[in-house]
Image: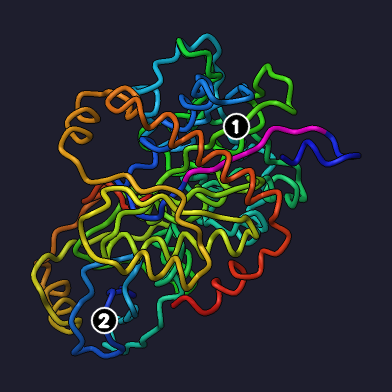
Amino acid sequence: MKIAIPASAPSLDAPMDSRFGRSAYFIIVDTNTMQWEAHENPAVRAGGGAGLQAVQFLSRFGTQAVIGSDFGPNATMALSAAGILMYQCNSPLTVREAVSQFSAGQLQQVDKATNPGHYGK
Amino acid sequence: MESNIPGTTPRPLRIAVASGKGGTGKTTVATSLALSLVEPPLTATSQPQVAFLDCDVEGPNAHLYLRPTFDRREDVVILVPEVDASKCTVCGKCAEVCQYHAILVLGTTPLVFPHLCHGCGSCARICPENAISEQPHPIGVVEAGITPHGIFFARGVLQTGEPLATPIIRRLKQWAIPPFTPSHSVIIFDAPPGTSCPVVETARGADFLLLVTEPTPFGLHDLRLAAQVAGELGIPAGVVINRDGIGDESVTSFCASAGLPILMRIPFQRAISEGIAQGRALLDIHPEYRTQFWDMFQHIQDLLEHHSQVGPLRKLATDSQ
């Protein structure tokens, strides 16, 4: 399965970024082969709608799931429309640790926004 | 005044009151100016008609001092896209053209996010299938009425939860046409704090920008920014120092070096703070300010008559940081 994790640096050992739409990087990992690639997030400096732009970007790579600590209402709506599953991980893990928790089935799947949104703030 | 220039269409004198920093006394100054013009001191030789536009649409409060009775009201809408799914081929052109990511094409149909939409209409124009129509989405209201002192008062109110203040201000300025002879009237625009789009929209087209500040490092920091806005827009500006006596001398020296005239100083005084906190206008607390505000208005008119070089202000925009 191809999963995307917001990260603060382009490495498997980088800490996860607690923000989804405005994370510095996305690490896309194939959980079957553990092959991974890092992409700069084009939405990091978006004026607004960063979450939406990030989802559109991730959908291009055939991303099937994302792990994040927080998902806003816009990103949630876009992720559902794109058929991308959301898994929540609140503890401060590295990307590698988040992936292993995901593979071990330890992360909670969510289907609703986990925060009320940031626009205008 | 602009209207006295032969061969030009008479128009009201437009004074915008801004500050950069919040809480410096913009509304106190703007409302006092309005009241002193509509009931000028006995020595005055003319009496202009006055319109007051509260452009602080995210938190309008000038009505608390001027107490208008609103008798006109209109919704402000922006046009947001609605997609006809039966015509849409999911080509994605609408999402590409949208600068604000308010429309997204994922899966089988475009998703529209009205709160991100600026209502520009590009998506509807670019859609090759004509699948997008534009629907009005209310974002606030404009209201107008007369105050007991005879001031034509209008304000915009942004609906809670809506992020776009600028379209309300733009609409307010088009909609609130004072029922006056343009050549003998003054329009006062009370700007929101800050120096971003809503302030620029308020100040655009003004003849003069009155910058209210306090003599502190915080006041100075934001006054510099506000003065740069004046410079960028090419609008002559002057300064009112409120709470004079606190802080330091840095605002005074900045004004001297930037060529910004200090038009009035209002002292930091308990009686003023108490009165304002009770919802009383400054002229009500200290009637002698009527003359001071009237004199400041005369001073502004003199500055405008002799103002042919915006030089110092334009220069300011580049070297003040």
Residue A121 in the image: x percent, y percent? 32, 53
Give the camera-side residue of A117 and B58.
B58
Residue A70 falls in which quadrant of the image?
bottom left
Chain identity of mark 2: A
- Label 1–label 2 contact, CB within 8 A: no
Report if residue A1 is visible in the image. Answer: no
Please name the residue that numbered disc 1 is placed on. Answer: B187
Quadrant in which the N terminus of chain B appears: top right
Give the residue type that dot 1 points to: Ile
Report if residue B312 is visible in the image. Answer: yes
Q: Which type of secondary structure does the marked residue at label 1 adopt?
A: strand
Residue B169 falls in which quadrant of the image?
top right
Q: Does the magenta stretch mainly form a helix, a strand or a loop?
A: strand
- In the image: residue A65, left or right of residue B230: left
Chain identity of mark 1: B
- In the image: residue B30, left or right of residue B85: left
Please name the residue that numbered disc 2 is placed on. Answer: A8
Give the residue type that dot 2 points to: Ser
Residue B165 vertical position relative to residue A95 in the rendered view, above or below: above
